[in-house]
Image (cartoon, rainbow, N blue to C red):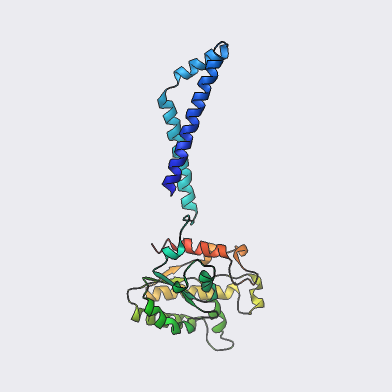
């Protein structure tokens, strides 16, 4: 795609320079009785085709440099068909992950999750996952787990969450030993998320995020720090301060292409 755009811009530049050249020549011809016309014709005679080509090449290089800079600064990979790109990938998680299919970015087939899911409830989806037998598996848990693993109520904490997450992954590996597993960091919330549950604070989520990275190290899975990509970008959130808007999912899927080729 970038090469096509580059070729088109190069042709436009060439056309523009040649048009300028011809316009100038005609201008000089029609004004050849004036000193200005004579001077201009002399200037044109001194210009070679090489100079014109050099200008085109210089302009082309500027476009290429700008294109490379844009590519390095952004995770946007253009008009990608996400459903096609991730056809061999399954996403598991809670309602945040579920929106991938609700926004029609991915097929329902590639999204296994339910509202309120935790790493414990996810064990129920292993049989379905085994039937799909995906090449890649992306897991995003932690939001509901912060509520579930509340030491004040259940005596379970983030360490219990870590143990249960490891159990989930080991169970998946038993039936899908060749599947590549990616663990996405729990995401941040806005200040008003505590209106939904007092446990939903970034302080608690930071603690659980650390546990997910430890789970990745313990199980040999790939850890993806998506949280840092959207940190402080409250405009990506829905009004509840927990869930995310459509634009967030494009950022997620684009960023994920750095890991899933």
User: Residue 50, located in which quarter of the rendered image?
Assistant: top left
Q: Farthest residue to the bottom: give it.
A: 154
Whether residue 53 is situated above or below residue 234 in the rendered picture: above
Residue at left offset 56%, top offset 62% = 247
Task: Say if 100 sits above or below 125 in the image.
Answer: above
Q: Camera-side residue: 250 or 28?
A: 28
Is residue 132 in view from this perspective?
Answer: yes
Residue placed furthest toward the left:
178
Q: Is residue 169 above or below residue 50?
A: below
- Give me the residue at 45% from left, 47% from top: 68
Quadrant, the C terminus: bottom left
Q: Nearer the viewer, residue 165 or 105?
A: 105
Q: Nearer the viewer, residue 36 or 8?
A: 8
**Residue 228: image location, x then y, percent:** 52, 64
Q: Total label count?
A: 0
Q: Is residue 177 above or below residue 6?
A: below
x and y percentages locating residue 154 in the rendered image: 55, 89
At x 42%, y 30%, the residue is 53
**Residue 186 is at least partly visible in this image:** no
Query: In the image, what residue occupies the spot 38% across and 82% down?
Result: 171
Which x, y percent locates residue 245? 59, 66
């Amino acid at each position: 795609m970038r090469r096509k755009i580059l070729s088109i811009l190069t042709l436009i530049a060439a056309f523009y320079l040649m048009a300028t050249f011809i316009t100038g020549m005609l201008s000089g011809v029609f004004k050849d009785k004036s000193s200005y016309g004579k001077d201009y014709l002399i200037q044109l005679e001194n210009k070679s085709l090489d100079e014109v080509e050099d200008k085109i090449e210089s302009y082309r290089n500027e476009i290429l440099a700008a294109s490379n800079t844009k590519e390095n600064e952004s995770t946007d990979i253009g008009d990608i068909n996400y459903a096609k790109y991730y056809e061999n990938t399954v996403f598991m998680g809670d309602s945040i992950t579920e929106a991938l299919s609700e926004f029609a970015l991915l097929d329902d087939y590639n999204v296994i999750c339910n509202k309120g899911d935790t790493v414990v409830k996810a064990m129920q989806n292993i049989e379905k996952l085994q039937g799909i037998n995906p090449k890649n598996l992306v897991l995003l848990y932690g939001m509901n787990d912060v509520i579930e693993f509340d030491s004040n109520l259940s005596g379970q904490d983030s360490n219990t969450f870590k143990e249960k997450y490891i159990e989930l992954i080991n169970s998946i590996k038993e039936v899908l030993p060749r599947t590549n597993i990616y663990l996405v960091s729990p995401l941040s919330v806005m200040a008003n998320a505590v209106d939904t549950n007092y446990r939903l604070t970034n302080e608690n989520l930071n603690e659980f995020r650390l546990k997910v990275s430890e789970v990745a190290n313990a199980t040999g899975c790939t850890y993806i720090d998506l949280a840092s990509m959207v940190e402080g970008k409250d405009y990506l959130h829905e009004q509840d301060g927990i869930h995310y808007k459509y634009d967030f999912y494009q950022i997620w899927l684009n960023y994920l292409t750095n890991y899933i080729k």
